[in-house]
Each structure stands twice: as C-alpha cells, then as structure tokens.
Image: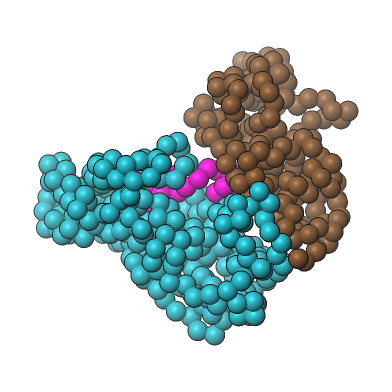
Chain colours: A brown, B cyan
C-alpha cells in the first residue's frame, strides 16, 4: 500500500494530509477533515449521497480516491452555508418546502442542486429533474425537492436583480 | 465496501503509463474517471495491485477532426464530449448516445476510453464505436496499433487490449453525405444499464434511396452487435415506414439475448426490434431533412 501527501482546497481552505492510496475522497472528508456533512450511502456510485463539487462540477466522492484530488478544489455541503452557518437560499427553500424527511440524501441533493443553479440560474423542471436524477431519496417522492430548487432559483434571480417580477428572498 | 490495498502512481505521459504497465504486469490497472473501476474495486470484484492514474496525462485529452474522422483522445471526459461543438457538427450520434450514459455526475468524471475498456455489453459509447466502424488506437509505448471496434470487444468486460497496452484515442469515421442518425434505449430508470439499446445511421441519395446504412444493438448480446441483415435489406431502397418496420424485425434473428433479473430474453428480443425501428425512423427523418447532421 502506498501513502501520499496531498494538498487540496476544501471549502476555500487549503488542507494538507498524508493519505493511503485506497482512501476514498468521501472517507477523507469525513474521517480526516471531520466534515461529516457529506454522507456515505452505497459506496459504489449509485445513491448520490456523497456528491461534492470538484472544481465546481458535481461528482460522487465515493468514486474517487483522495490522492486523486491533489491540487483540486472541493466544495462540500458545509461550503454552501454562509458565515456562522447561515443557511443559503437553497437550504432555506429545502426547509420551507419540506424537501427532506430523514435527511440522508439532503447533502447530496443540495450540492447537486447548487451546482445546477450556479450554471443555470433559471432551470426548467426537466433540467432540475435531470440534475437530481443521480440522487436517490427514499422519503420525499422528490416533488418537494424539485419545488424547493425552483423556489431557490426564483429567489436568487430576484436577489441578483435579473427577475423584477419576484420579490422576497 | 472499501477497495483493497493498492499502490498508486500518478502518470504524466503515455510513455510513463506504458513503462508502469510493463513493470507491474497484469496486476496493474489504469484509472481514468473511475466510474466503473472504483465500484468494482469497492465490491472486491477486482483487486489491482497497482493503479496508474492517467487524469494528469494531457496528451490523452482532446477532440480533433480531419476530413476522414473525428478523433477523441482516450481520457477525454464524457461531459467535455457532450458540449463539444466539433462533436455536435461532425458526429452528433455521440451526443444522442451520451444522453443515456449514466448521469451528469458520472459523466463529469467518466471518460470515453474508460467506457471502451470496461466493455459493458450494454454501454452506449462502445455501441456507437461498433456502429460507425471506429478504430481504437492503442500503444505499448513503442508500437501503436489500430484495432477495429468490431474486433475490440470480445466478451462482456473483455477486450482485445493486451495488459501492456493503453488506449490512446478512438477515431470515428465521418459521413459526409445526406446522413442522419438515431439512438434509442430502454432501461429500468434513466441512467441505468440498458435492457436494450439501438443505434442507426443512414445516408440517402438525392432521390431519397438509402445508399449506406449502419445498425447496431447493445445489451442483448455479449458485445455490441452490428445487424448486417438489416443493413443489407435497406440498401438501394426508399425508406418507407413499412420498409423500416419490416427490416427492424430482422434484428431478432441476429441478437442472442439472455434472461436476467431485469428482463427476459424474449422481452429483450422484442424491445430490440422496436428500438431499431425508432432509431431508423429518427435517422431517416434527419437525413430526409437534408441537413446531413450525421456527417
């Protein structure tokens, strides 16, 4: 087994550690950095609970080894909230719309949905479904999750002043 | 559900990859996107002693085209192929197929070469490579060989690639005439492995007769399969709906589907014919539209 020193940015902070080659990125985030917001579900790329942003794109952190993240930029669910843990517009919309029940899939849903909103401020329902189709939820039936993403998109557009019709947010 | 121990090597050139492959022998595996390899390692279906990472090999990334072919380097990510205007212009069936490849999260890591060497019989990109008579460029560091896609896939998860060889690129021949393409698939859920899939690309002459046809079916045999009897049946004919329907039924005689958890052999045979019909109908409509977008 080989060990490797890695340096990567996680939620804007540079982190350095020595990791065994076989350690997955999600295990590194949770067990070494203690960022336990990212959940481990199936560990073989099916459920999407471990979704993080890798250089801005959503990926499954159980399907890459920590050593492969050398030099890259990772955003976890902890990186979505503001100062003092203030909820983001998307997180608030999830709370208001009852877009979670047990909460196990929620970090993955949030990270995947945030990546969508970053790339596409006004997504269609099809685009939202497509962006979240890789994330399994066994509680909600998805409807409220899609509504929450739509609500967050509306509020974020209003905040950035691109949508004059909608207030609040 | 954790991978067994292995030694990790971060390669920066193809020469280095090949040197490591020859050093470590059959116990070494190349990792690119890892979207199929890592689950297999987690489930201990494979336990490579060494992983050679090609994510930082710049010469294995990129999309180029000549008059004759579109060349996609092996470690080019599926998400980069999806947004490539070169691919959209010259080989749009790849985009139609990519729509069915996993999910955006796996396409953000997964590569063309990874899909080819994994050789899942239901995989979409291998199906397109067989459909278009693509060439797989491989090297052992000293000699570069070209393997026709139709000879590359030997059995489920088995390819003609030798242990010391690395896939460098795949070349998809371009069709310059009045061509169109179609890709259809049935799977339990979007992004799941296909129960059956069908790809078609055809070219029409000015009178609307079919002068070139390629049809291939995936998920219903040990490897992606060209359906030569359909291709022969369509040549020199105008493609009416009836002609397409009749030809599509010939798929049932060529494929050799299995029963499994997801579908019976009988269902696969039936659905494959219907998917061929749909793919051909799309291809015909696109070609008849006259823009020749399947070049």
Question: Quarter holding the C terminus of chain A?
Answer: top right
Vertical side of B241 occupied by B66: above or below: below
The reply to whether residue B243 is in sight is: yes
Q: Residue furthest right?
A: A84
B106 within the magenta span: yes
Residues rendered magenta in the picture: B93-110
Vertical comparison of A167 with B253: above or below: above
Instruction: Give the quarter of the figure containing the N terminus of chain A.
Output: bottom right
Foreground of the two, B26 or B98: B26
Relative side of B58 to B158, left or right: right
Residue B114: x %, y % from top left: 53, 60
- Does residue B174 appear in this view? no
How many marks on residues?
A: 0
Q: Quadrant of residue A113?
A: top right
Find residue B218 and report its horizontal and vertical position in percent. 35, 52
Vertical relation: B100 (above or below) A155: below
| Closer to us: A155 or B202 | B202
Query: What residue is rendered at 34% in x and 46% in y?
Result: B259
Residue at 66% across, 48% down:
B1
- Residue B32 counted in the magenta span: no
Q: Specify the quadrant of the image occupied by residue A108.
A: top right
In the displayed structure, does residue B134 sit left or right of residue A160?
left
Identified at 72% across, 37% down, the residue is A39
Position in image of residue B10 (x %, y %):
70, 68
Whole-percent x and y of residue A20? 78, 59
Q: Residue sitting at 75 percent across and 42 percent down? A: A75
* Residue A82 placement: quadrant: top right
């Amino acid at each position: 087994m080989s060990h490797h020193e890695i340096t990567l940015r996680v939620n804007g902070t540079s982190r350095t550690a020595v990791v065994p080659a076989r350690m997955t990125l999600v295990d590194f985030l949770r067990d070494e950095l203690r960022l336990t917001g990212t959940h481990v579900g199936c560990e073989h790329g099916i459920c999407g609970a471990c979704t993080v942003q890798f250089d801005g794109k959503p990926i499954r952190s159980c399907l890459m080894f920590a050593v492969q993240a050398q030099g890259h930029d990772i955003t976890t669910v902890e990186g979505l909230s503001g100062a003092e843990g203030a909820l983001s517009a998307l997180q608030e919309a999830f709370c208001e719309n009852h877009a979670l029940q047990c909460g196990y899939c929620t970090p993955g849903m949030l990270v995947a949905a945030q990546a969508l909103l970053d790339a596409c401020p006004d997504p269609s329902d099809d685009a939202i479904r497509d962006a979240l189709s890789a994330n399994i939820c066994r509680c909600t039936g998805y409807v409220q999750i899609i509504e929450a993403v739509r609500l967050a998109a509306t509020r974020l557009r209003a905040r950035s002043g691109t949508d004059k019709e909608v207030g609040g947010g | 559900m954790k991978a067994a121990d292995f030694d990790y090597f971060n390669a920066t050139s193809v020469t280095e990859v090949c040197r490591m492959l020859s050093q470590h022998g059959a116990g070494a595996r190349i990792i690119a996107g890892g979207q199929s390899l890592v689950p297999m390692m987690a489930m201990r279906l494979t336990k490579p002693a060494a992983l050679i990472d090609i994510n930082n090999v710049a010469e294995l990334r990129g999309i180029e085209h000549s008059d004759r072919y579109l060349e996609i380097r092996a470690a080019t990510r599926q998400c980069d192929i999806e947004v490539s205007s070169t691919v959209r212009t010259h080989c749009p069936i790849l985009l139609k197929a990519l729509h069915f490849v996993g999910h955006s999260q796996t396409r953000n890591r997964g590569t063309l070469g990874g899909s080819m060497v994994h050789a899942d019989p239901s995989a979409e990109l291998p199906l397109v490579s067989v459909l278009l008579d693509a060439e797989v460029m491989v090297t052992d560091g000293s000699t570069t060989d070209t393997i026709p896609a139709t000879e590359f896939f030997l059995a489920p998860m088995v390819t003609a690639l030798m242990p010391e060889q690395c896939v460098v690129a795949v070349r998809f021949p371009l069709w310059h005439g009045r061509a169109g393409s179609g890709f259809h698939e049935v799977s339990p859920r979007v992004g799941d492995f296909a129960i059956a899939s069908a790809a078609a690309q055809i070219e029409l002459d000015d009178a609307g007769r079919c002068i070139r046809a390629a049809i291939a079916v995936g998920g219903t045999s040990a490897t992606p399969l060209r359906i030569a009897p359909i291709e022969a049946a369509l040549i020199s004919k105008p493609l009416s709906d009836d002609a397409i329907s009749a030809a599509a039924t010939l798929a049932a005689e060529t494929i050799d589907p299995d029963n499994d958890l997801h579908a019976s052999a009988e269902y696969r045979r039936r659905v494959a014919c219907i998917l061929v019909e749909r793919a051909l109908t799309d291809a015909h409509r696109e070609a008849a539209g006259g823009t020749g977008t399947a070049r």
